[in-house]
Amino acid sequence: MYETIYHRPSSIDEAAALFAKNEDGKYLAGGHTLIPVMKSRLAAPSNVIDIGRIPALIGIEAAGGTLMIKAATTYYDIMSSTQVKQSIPAIARLTSMLGDPQVRARGTIGGSIANNDPAADFPAAVLALGATIRTNKRDIAADDFFKGIFTTALQDGELITAVLFPLAAKAGYSKFRHPASRFALTGVFVAQSKGGDVRAVATGASQSGVMRVGEIEKALKANWSAAALDSVKISPDGLLEDIHGTAEYRANLVKVMAQRAVESAE
Amino acid sequence: MTIVTRKVSLTVNGKAVSADVEDRTLLVHLLRDNLGLTGTHVGCDTSQCGACTVHIDGRAVKSCTVLVGQADGSNVTTIEGLAGHNELHPMQAAFRDNHGLQCGYCTPGMIMAAVDMVRRHGGKLDEATVRQELEGNICRCTGYHNIVKSVLDAAGRMEMASAAE
Ligand SMILES: Cc1cc2nc3c(=O)[nH]c(=O)nc-3n(C[C@H](O)[C@H](O)[C@H](O)COP(=O)(O)OP(=O)(O)OC[C@H]3O[C@@H](n4cnc5c(N)ncnc54)[C@H](O)[C@@H]3O)c2cc1C
Ligand code: FES
Ligand code: FES
């Protein structure tokens, strides 16, 4: 790892001020993406600004039809939260399948969506549930947030403070895990909103990152059941192809994971 | 270029310690190189193997993926801090009794992960849960079978010990 200067601000404003004042800064939350890439010298920020202990960035609140998870809340705290399990159980399920216990003890929801890895789990939930990403500057709709792999609508120095999920009528997640990395070879999050809108979002599948799958949404809107997807065909165009699986293989996984997600939905 | 260091202070295995280190230092290197606690191992470069697992404020984490600054002020327990005066921790004893190790490289990390696992699940641990919960720890020797047996055995011993208290 190259040299870096570590800062530990105690408030959101102090964190943003440190970012503005110091050249080439990066926020550090759980560190479970940033530290590995710094170790391999793929990133070398001169300043790291640790937001992982800022009290205003940690916690979970459920009120008025919304589940709010603050940005630096760890996966472990999310999956063990009664509020999460009661309001959107699919989020607790997704979190319990993410990484391994040690990763879940450190990694955060804010870090996951800011990073927007094409195989990460949380972006699928955020987009499928039509969540709102709250930053220190504004509210961003999930539809406008994910801009392609490792790219988001966040501006330089903009800090995610919380993610607000509207409660759903039904939601489910299923993923086919890469056996070594635990990331999604393909994962699908399905959700039916209280207004009857249906979304199905795949992660790990597309070359452009997290994506809505129109064919699946249409079939599920007509008939919310795994069987309704039997005759759906997903095109391999634009899907990822690597040593772990061909585009055709991933296209089939999108359908199968969507079916399992519907079966798990509650 | 002058190397800038700073003082970090933390509690390791119950003792207050401090060290002057560069900000880029990883917790595992502070433990091994500055404090001489070489029971915590480094087995990979990708945060995947779990050989470096220690407890920070009671939770099992990979110390190769934590900067010293993040651990400043925390309470850290390593494999060296588990045993009593003359007595192994029940998890260590169970690994010995069940032949839960061969070369031993992964063992400190396995044991630290397993102690946290028992803390979180208590008596509700079954074989499937243990296997799932060991996903963050890689062993190249044992085939995991005896590791799982050790953890289940220790979970029983730890339950009995806490019931007796
Ligand atoms: C072994 C292993 C297995 C994993 N398996 C999975 C998996 O199965 N699924 C999965 O989804 N992920 C997986 N991950 C990645 C893990 O989820 C990371 O924790 C996550 O990608 C980043 O979250 P973090 O809190 O650790 O962020 P950090 O590493 O601290 O930060 C990541 C990036 O986000 C930025 N950032 C962090 N917080 C904020 C914020 N609040 N506002 C703005 N920017 C911010 C940082 O500047 C940095 O650029 C795995 C990681 C490891 C090491
Ligand atoms: S050395 Fe930390 S996970 Fe491998
Ligand atoms: S005992 Fe050798 S790596 Fe596990």
Image (cartoon, coloured by chain):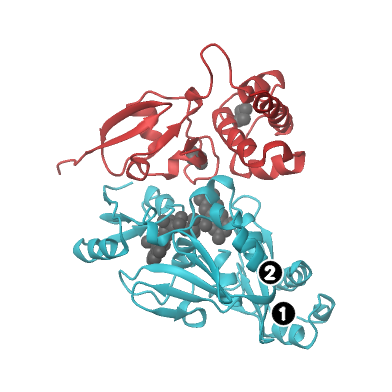
Chain colours: A cyan, B red
Task: Identify the residue at the far top of this view.
Answer: B86
Quadrant for the C terminus of chain B in the image: top right
In this picture, residue B47 sits left or right of residue A217: left
How would you rate the neighbour count of disc 1 (Cα within 10 Å): few for under 14, some for 14-19, many for 20 or more?
Answer: some
* Residue A123 position within the rendered picture, expressed as x and y whole percent measured from the top left: 54, 70
* Residue A103 position within the rendered picture, expressed as x and y whole percent measured from the top left: 53, 49
Indicate whether A165 appears above or below B34.
Answer: below
Q: What element carries label 1?
A: loop
User: As rendered, which of B94 and A121 lies closer to the eye?
Assistant: B94
* Residue B115 position within the rendered picture, expressed as x and y whole percent measured from the top left: 60, 33
Task: Identify the residue at the far front of this view.
Answer: B165
* Residue A139 position within the rendered picture, expressed as x and y whole percent measured from the top left: 42, 79
For the point 69% across and 45% down, which residue is it?
A: B132
Q: Earlier in the sequence, mark 1 or mark 2?
A: 1
Indicate whether A112 appears above or below A127.
Answer: above
Residue type of the residue flagged with mark 2: Arg
User: As rendered, which of A205 and B93 lies closer to the eye?
Assistant: B93
User: As rendered, which of A193 and A116 lies closer to the eye?
Assistant: A193
Provide the residue designation for mark 2: A250
Indicate whether A8 appears above or below A195.
Answer: above
Tell me if I can see residue B164 in this picture.
yes
Tell me if I can see residue A44 in this picture.
no
In this picture, residue B101 sits left or right of residue A131: right
Provide the residue designation for mark 1: A234
For the point 22% across and 66% down, which residue is it?
A: A20
